[in-house]
Amino acid sequence: MSDGHNFRLGIIGSGKGSNAAAIADACASGLIPAQVALVISDIPDAGVLQRARERGLPAVFIPPGKFRSKLEGPAEAAWVRALQEARVDLVALAGFMRILKDGFLRAFPQRVVNIHPALLPAFPGLEAWKQALEYGVKFTGVTVHFVDQGVDTGPILAQRTVPVLPGDTAATLHARIQEAEREVYPATLAALARGAVRVEGRQTLWD
Ligand code: GRF
């Protein structure tokens, strides 16, 4: 699928792929001036691969190696090689459940971004919507950030608040958060693809 845009996105994910689908659709509609060059998953039958293939996008499972929660060693090298061969300009994590290490991040300096389902630095790590619900906050939200060597610690690109409503369950809150994700992530990737974001230390400035 060619849409005439030269900026090339790689998407990596482990889950059902709602963010990946929103990003792919935003590329197809021209909202993001980019094309999805490759989708990779560490789970052979992940929804994210399915949703990419339905859209005619190249989507592959690449074995994640021997570790359970990180990508390292020969597996990391294989993932980097695939993304480099696809000539990606930016790697977007979309529900990717592994920690990326130095080797990967050095291959794509300041070119890896993630969406996190909370207002960082609150509730980093897993199931952030559950953490927010259990803590009792009245607002949580979403954060798009650059990926660095920490867990959910890189410079923040964009955030949006989402209310926690009376009677919310983990599922209803997560669904509301995911609605926000599907808007904020494509809008941020569009700004990055346009070259409209400058980074100064931890500050990111949108033109
Ligand atoms: C999203 O809530 C994202 O914030 C988190 O994992 C979930 C992935 O969902 N990192 P999907 O695979 O994009 O549907």
Image (spheres, grey):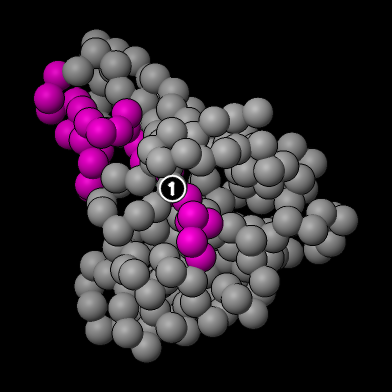
Determine whether, in the image, residue 151 is placed left or right of residue 36: left
Q: Quadrant of residue 175?
A: top left
Q: Amino acid at mark 1?
A: Phe
Q: Quadrant of residue 163?
A: top left
Residue 66, given in percent of the width and then of the height, sits at 25, 84
- In the image, 192 versus 134, the foreground residue is 192
Which residue is depicted at the point 49% across and 55% down?
110
| Position of 44 relative to 189 (above/below) | below
Stretch of the chain drawn in magenta: 108-136
Which residue is depicted at the point 29% across and 16% down?
139
Query: Which residue is farthest bottom?
Result: 74
| Position of 12 relative to 158 (above/below) | below
- The residue carrying mark 1 is 146
Whether residue 26 appears in this view of the structure is no
Determine whether, in the image, residue 46 is placed left or right of residue 35: left
| Position of 107 relative to 185 (above/below) | below
- In the image, 170 versus 102, the foreground residue is 102
Residue 50, given in percent of the width and then of the height, sits at 57, 63
